Amino acid sequence: MSEPLNALTITLFSEILTVEQLLRNSLTRVLPKGMEISHFSVLNHLARSNGERTPAQLAKSFHVTRGAMTNTLGKLEWAGYVHIRPDWDDARRKFVAISPAGKQARDAALAAISPVLSSLYSEMGEEKVRGALPFLRELRVRLESDL
């Protein structure tokens, strides 16, 4: 990789990492008390999927270890936001579903973060947002294929 291209690539990824950190900070400040971005992400995933998932499936979807997902699910179960049940055919496996309280918590979190995201969207404009999506999607797909 040539030096100018290397510098450009490093600048790109530095920007992406900085944006990710700033966005996390902005969203964490407005999430309901005690909720973390990882909690919201799992609740949102379960709410949108309309079904049960195994902890292993969730870990794969979020590109985290099974241990990290187990930790997140334990906190969500303790809060009453998810139901975790054994697989009746294989006791080694479990299934996770969002609870009614989890749906309410997800909706409250979505209501809290929506103004932040709407403001960014309004400031940046639809054209820039739409223009960024193909590059970001391609980057995600390429990075996923490296795992």
Image (cartoon, rainbow, N blue to C red):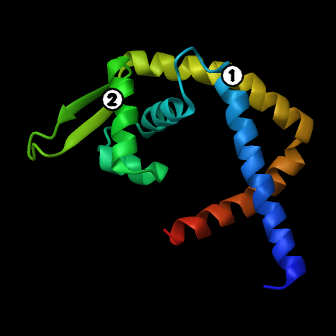
Q: Examine the rendered structure and indicate whether residue 78 appears above or below residue 141.
A: above
Q: Quadrant of the N terminus?
A: bottom right
Whole-percent x and y of residue 126?
86, 44
Which image quadrant for residue 111?
top right
Asked if residue 98 shows in the view, the reply is: no
Whole-percent x and y of residue 75?
38, 26
Q: Along the horizontal axis of the image, is 115 left or right of 104? A: right
- Element class at badge 2: helix
Q: Residue at x 55, y 20 (%)?
A: 107
Q: As shown in the figure, which amino acid type bears the numbered disc 2?
A: Gly
Whole-percent x and y of residue 71?
36, 35
Q: Nearer the viewer, residue 113 or 4?
A: 4
Which residue in the protein does label 1 denote? 29
Which residue in the protein does label 2 denote? 74
Q: As shown in the figure, which amino acid type bears the numbered disc 1?
A: Arg
Q: Examine the rendered structure and indicate whether residue 62 appears above or below residue 87.
A: below
Q: Residue at x 90, y 78 (%)?
A: 4
Crowdedness of circle 1 by 10 Å Cα count: few (<14), some, many (20+)?
Answer: few
Q: Along the horizontal axis of the image, is 123 left or right of 129? A: right
- Element class at badge 1: helix
Disc 1/disc 2 C-alpha distance (Å): 23 Å
Q: Along the horizontal axis of the image, is 60 left or right of 19? A: left
Whole-percent x and y of residue 144?
53, 65
Q: Residue at x 83, y 34 (%)?
A: 120
Earlier in the chain: of badge 1 and badge 2, it is: 1
Q: Residue at x 71, y 59 (%)?
A: 136
Q: Verify CB contact (< 8 Å) between mark 1 and mark 2.
A: no
Q: Nearer the viewer, residue 48 or 120?
A: 120
